[in-house]
């Protein structure tokens, strides 16, 4: 049984672990457990797995009606988790974070079923902090999590990443042809995520003149929520070096084209970028639980592996930071080498190795 959801950052690792398990044990059966009104209820079946939903949500930071219903949701989810485990009889239960993994992993560990959690971030969420006391094994993506978890249970594995990135052989020539850009100009890649990042998009719109005046190129993924706000700027700038899209279907092409990448600092994004090995400027989202994106970005910036700009400093620091990287080959080389050192490309395999040890 696997549980992880609420965001793609929890769902994708769970699916990736299941895929690796299925490749090793083709006869095995899988059941996912998620929160019944969250995106995992759609994404997991798309990946070819069964899923059951729990009536569960997180605790809001301010007093709300939802908070008053939380104890009832928790009791309901514990009862249903107990029922699902009794019926499915899992050999191992795996959690990748998100509200639904709490009740399921808690019940499994109480019943003596082998349990493993995978923590994507450098600053764990409340669910995994609570579960760490009772589960058997904790797979992490960052060093230094002994501050939060029992040291004896921790194994550094990294985060599962999209298949194909580890052997990306796309050349810059192929990428330039794909986007209709030139190979002899420096290119900035902006990733707003699949939905988008409002503050990052607003700031990028302000630097388009700088891109044009310096003869740079820009590949800008706005996210589907914001494409209508910015698509017209491509024509308005009257410059072939600016490409604005809601979503980039060929991330291998985008990474091959980029000389520097501007992005949020979600754990999955960071794991991919360590493998891509391109100079990166992180602008952490301040609107996430426990400000974990800032902790993620700091884990790299303190090692000279990336540049960190707080969202409220973008106006004054963004152009200067991008300009410094693009005009300094030594800095490009240093950032690339340092971020590559942190890559853990075999995360799915390493996590499943730990699952196999638990099964034995």
Image: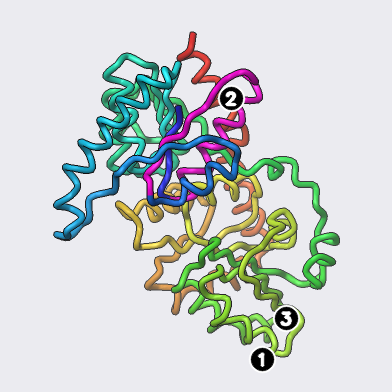
Seen in the picture, residue 155 relative to 253 is either above or below; the reply is above
Point out the tag, 2 or 1, that comes first from the N-terminus: 2
Residue 171: x and y in percent read 82, 55
Out of 164 and 20, give the one closest to the viewer: 20
Marks 2 and 1, how far apart in space? Answer: 50 Å
Residue 196 in the figure: left or right of residue 103: right
**Front tag of 2 and 3:** 2
Residue at 17 percent across and 53 percent down: it is 67
Residue at 51 percent across and 51 percent down: it is 304
Residue 173: x and y in percent read 85, 61
Is residue 112 a member of the stretch shown in magenta?
no
Residue 76, quarter of the rendered image? top left
For label 1, the crowd category at 10 Å Cα-Cα, with few meaning under 14, some 14 to 19 and many 20 or more, is few
Residue 103 in the figure: left or right of residue 204: left
Out of 210 and 246, give the one closest to the viewer: 246
Point out the tag, 2 or 3, that comes first from the N-terminus: 2
The segment highlighted magenta reads 7-36
Q: Secondary structure at mark 3?
A: loop
Q: Answer yes or no: is residue 149 visible.
A: no
Residue 110: x and y in percent read 27, 19
Marks 3 and 1, how far apart in space? Answer: 16 Å
Is residue 21 a member of the stretch shown in magenta?
yes
Marks 2 and 3, how far apart in space? Answer: 48 Å
Query: Which residue is under mark 1?
Result: 236
Query: Which residue is under mark 2?
Result: 21
Query: Which residue is under mark 3?
Result: 215
Seen in the picture, residue 117 relative to 205 is either above or below; the reply is above
């Amino acid at each position: 049984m696997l549980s992880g959801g609420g965001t793609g950052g929890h769902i994708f690792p769970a699916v990736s672990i299941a895929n690796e398990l299925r490749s090793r044990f083709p006869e095995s059966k899988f059941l996912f457990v998620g929160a019944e009104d969250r995106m995992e209820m759609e994404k997991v079946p798309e990946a070819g797995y069964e899923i059951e939903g729990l009536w569960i949500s997180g605790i809001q930071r301010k007093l709300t009606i939802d908070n008053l219903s939380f104890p009832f949701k928790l009791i309901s989810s514990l009862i249903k988790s107990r029922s699902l485990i009794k019926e499915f009889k899992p050999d191992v239960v795996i959690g990748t974070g998100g509200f639904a993994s709490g009740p399921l992993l808690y019940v499994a560990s109480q019943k003596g079923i082998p349990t493993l959690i995978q923590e994507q971030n450098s600053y764990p969420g409340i669910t995994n902090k609570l579960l760490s006391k009772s589960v058997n094994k904790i797979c992490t993506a960052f060093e230094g999590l002994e501050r939060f978890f029992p040291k004896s249970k921790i194994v550094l594995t990294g985060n599962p990443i999209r298949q194909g990135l580890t052997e990306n052989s796309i050349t810059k020539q192929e990428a330039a042809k794909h986007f209709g850009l030139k190979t002899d100009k420096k290119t900035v890649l902006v990733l707003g995520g699949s939905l988008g990042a409002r503050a990052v998009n607003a700031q990028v719109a302000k630097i388009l003149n700088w891109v044009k005046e310096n003869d740079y190129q820009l590949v800008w993924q706005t996210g589907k929520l914001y494409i209508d706000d910015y698509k017209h700027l491509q024509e308005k700038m009257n410059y072939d070096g600016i490409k604005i899209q809601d979503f980039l279907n060929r991330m291998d092409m985008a990474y091959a084209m980029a000389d520097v990448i501007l992005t949020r600092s979600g754990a999955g994004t960071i794991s991919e970028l360590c493998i891509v090995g391109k100079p990166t400027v992180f602008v952490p989202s301040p609107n996430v639980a426990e400000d974990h994106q800032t902790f993620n970005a700091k884990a790299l910036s303190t090692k000279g592996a990336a540049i960190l700009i707080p969202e409220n400093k973008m106006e004054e620091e963004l152009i200067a930071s991008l300009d410094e990287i693009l005009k300094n080959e030594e800095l490009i080389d240093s950032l690339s080498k340092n971020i590559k050192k942190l890559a853990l490309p075999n995360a799915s395999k390493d996590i499943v190795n730990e699952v196999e040890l638990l099964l034995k």
